[in-house]
Image (cartoon, helix red, strand yellow):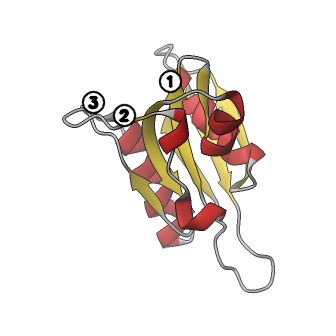
Amino acid sequence: MKQKFKNTSDPISDYLIRIKNAVAAGHRLVEIPASNMKKEITKILFDQGYILNYKFEETENKQGLIKIALKYHPVTKVPAIRGVKRISTPGLRKYSKSENLPRVLNGLGIAIISTPKGIMTDKEARKQNVGGEVLCYIY
């Protein structure tokens, strides 16, 4: 059964909730409509070890699709993504200077920041001394 994707007012929240729900349900794969920002966030999640793999596919409506293979511990089946929290929303944007960037779980989680130099983790933003919009926390 193919599901039609609804138009949401906050596509990043939709992306995060789809991942969160798939992890809660124990799914191995989740499909999400693509955008450039979602692709960058997916690459960060892969680089930080929160997802197993990802694939960008073209669709007939030119939007594209992101297929994400979720990561679980091989023995205990505990998901790599324990929590996802949206910080900046379309109704209330949250910006942070480079010296005030948040630390998630005292450095065990990551904050994804949208900076003028692109989307990056809080650690990379501190290293490059740039601030920006705090999109979400992942731990």
Q: Check disc 1 and give the amino acid type.
A: Ser
Dot label at residue 11: 2
Dot label at residue 7: 3
User: Residue at image x 50%, y 24%?
Assistant: 35
Left or right: 40 in relation to 114: right
Give the farthest residue toward the left: 91
Q: Position of residue 97 (x, y in %)?
A: 47, 33
Give the farthest residue toward the bottom: 76
Left or right: 128 in relation to 34: right
Q: Check disc 3 and give the amino acid type.
A: Asn
Q: Is residue 26 positioned above or below 102 on the image? A: below
- Of residue 5 and residue 105, the one placed in the foreground of this image is 105
Quadrant in which residue 11 is drawn: top left
Which secondary structure, mark 3?
Answer: loop
- Of residue 8 and residue 138, the one placed in the foreground of this image is 138
Cα separation, mark 1 vs mark 3, equals 13 Å
